[in-house]
Image (tube, helix red, strand yellow):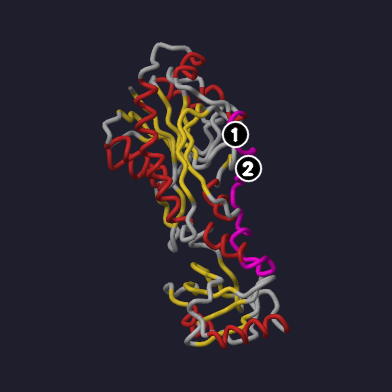
């Protein structure tokens, strides 16, 4: 069974690697063009392209598959049996979806119909969902609306951030794709409708939950809004890890981990900080900074403690060290 794999980020590259290592015949990869990455802004291949190069798989890069007739013609000539799509980053037009005889199949990182769209893992964390998962669906022209043939759920733990949850979902996705392709292989001579019936495909209208949209993240989303409640800010930090940030005197400080937990705090200092914040604390204001209890910042409701952070140009460190590096003192206020 000849496969064309579509994907771009590291998450997708891990899925590609699993398929190849499982013995599947990936005859080509379609990915986004090389981008400028890192501090030097050097032109670098996508993780999927790099994985394909390592395996010796031909690579097709396209800025817009809808407008790229050359790539469309190459794909037709490849005569692949099936297309597998994992976080490609573009919506495939009908003429592409209709090409492979065994169809186009997408591994999506949510429990559909929840979080259709570009950033399902991030929004599940930001939204404080209790669970998420992977759905393997037959692709159609709508945005992640196709019938689902495989699904696996995972609980979202309190300790999960974007990096941890993404890795876990990548492992689940890789496993489900290997399983799914074996099932799809057995439907070779069936029509699309018969194939979906044989695979026990479930229309998303019959799945639990309501449709929601995981829109593409914007630059503004990463700037912490201290006017929100503490829990919301912490969930945002987890969902955007490691790139949520605040600003002090024009310098960016990434907040990598924060908590409302009080188990590390001196009780008398904590009580005083709560009294102070109730009377004087404004959202974004530092209400405590010392070597024992670290750095605490007021939110809309209660303070949060900075566990790890990173001042631009420096290595990640604890909250108290950040206060020294940035010359932060009590009553200073972070910019929203």
Residue 38 location, quadrant: bottom left
Instruction: Give whichever of 268, 78 is nearer the camera.
Output: 268
Which residue is pictured at 49% across the width and 67% down the height? Answer: 256
Describe residue 278's horizontal placement relative to residue 182 as left or right: right
Question: Residue 74, image x and y in percent?
Answer: 42, 25
Residue 46 counted in the magenta span: no
Question: Which secondary structure, mark 1?
Answer: loop
Question: Which secondary structure, mark 2?
Answer: strand
Question: Residue 257, image x and y in percent?
Answer: 49, 68
Question: Residue 89, image x and y in percent?
Answer: 52, 41
Q: Are marks 1 and 2 in contact (CB under 8 Å)?
A: yes
Q: Which residue has dot 1 on it?
A: 143
Question: Residue 255, image x and y in percent?
Answer: 52, 69
- Position of the N terminus, as image quadrant, is top left
Residue 220 counted in the magenta span: yes
Q: CA distance from mark 1 to mark 2?
A: 9 Å
Please state the extent of the stretch shown in magenta in the rendering. 206-230
Q: Which mark is residue 240?
A: none
Q: Which residue has dot 2 on it?
A: 213
Which residue is pictured at 42% across the width and 46% down the height? Answer: 11
Mark 1 and mark 2 lie on one chain; the one further toward the N terminus is: 1
Figure check: 30 above or below 42: above
- Position of the C terminus, as image quadrant, is bottom right
Describe residue 94's horizontal placement relative to residue 153 as left or right: right
């Amino acid at each position: 069974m000849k496969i064309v794999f579509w994907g771009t980020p590291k998450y997708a590259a891990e899925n590609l690697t699993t398929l190849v290592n499982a013995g599947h015949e990936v005859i080509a990869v379609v990915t986004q063009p090389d981008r400028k990455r890192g501090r030097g802004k050097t032109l670098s291949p996508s993780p999927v392209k790099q994985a394909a190069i390592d395996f010796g798989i031909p690579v097709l890069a396209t800025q817009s598959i809808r407008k790229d007739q050359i790539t469309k013609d190459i794909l037709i000539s490849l005569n692949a049996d099936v297309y597998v799509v994992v976080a490609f980053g573009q919506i495939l037009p009908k003429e592409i979806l209709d090409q492979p005889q065994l169809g186009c199949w997408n591994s999506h990182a949510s429990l559909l119909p929840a979080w259709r769209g570009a950033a399902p893992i991030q929004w599940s964390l930001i939204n404080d969902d209790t669970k998420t998962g992977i759905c393997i669906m037959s692709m159609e022209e709508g945005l992640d609306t196709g019938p689902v043939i495989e699904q696996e759920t995972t609980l979202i733990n309190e300790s999960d951030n974007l990096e941890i949850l993404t890795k876990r979902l990548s492992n689940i996705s890789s496993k489900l794709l290997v399983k799914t392709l074996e099932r799809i292989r057995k439907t070779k001579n069936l029509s699309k409708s018969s194939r979906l019936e044989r695979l026990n495909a479930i229309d998303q209208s019959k799945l639990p939950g309501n449709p929601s949209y995981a829109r593409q993240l914007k630059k503004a989303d990463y700037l912490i809004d201290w006017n929100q409640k503490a829990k919301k800010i912490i969930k945002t930090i987890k969902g955007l890890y490691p790139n949520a940030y605040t600003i002090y005197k024009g310098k960016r400080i990434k907040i990598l981990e924060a908590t409302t937990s009080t188990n590390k705090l001196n009780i008398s200092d904590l009580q005083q900080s709560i009294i102070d914040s109730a009377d004087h604390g404004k959202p974004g204001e530092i209400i405590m900074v010392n070597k024992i209890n670290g750095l605490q910042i007021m939110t809309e409701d209660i303070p949060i403690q900075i566990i790890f952070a990173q001042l631009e140009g420096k290595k990640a460190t604890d909250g108290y060290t950040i206060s020294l590096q940035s010359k932060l003192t009590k009553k200073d206020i972070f910019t929203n």
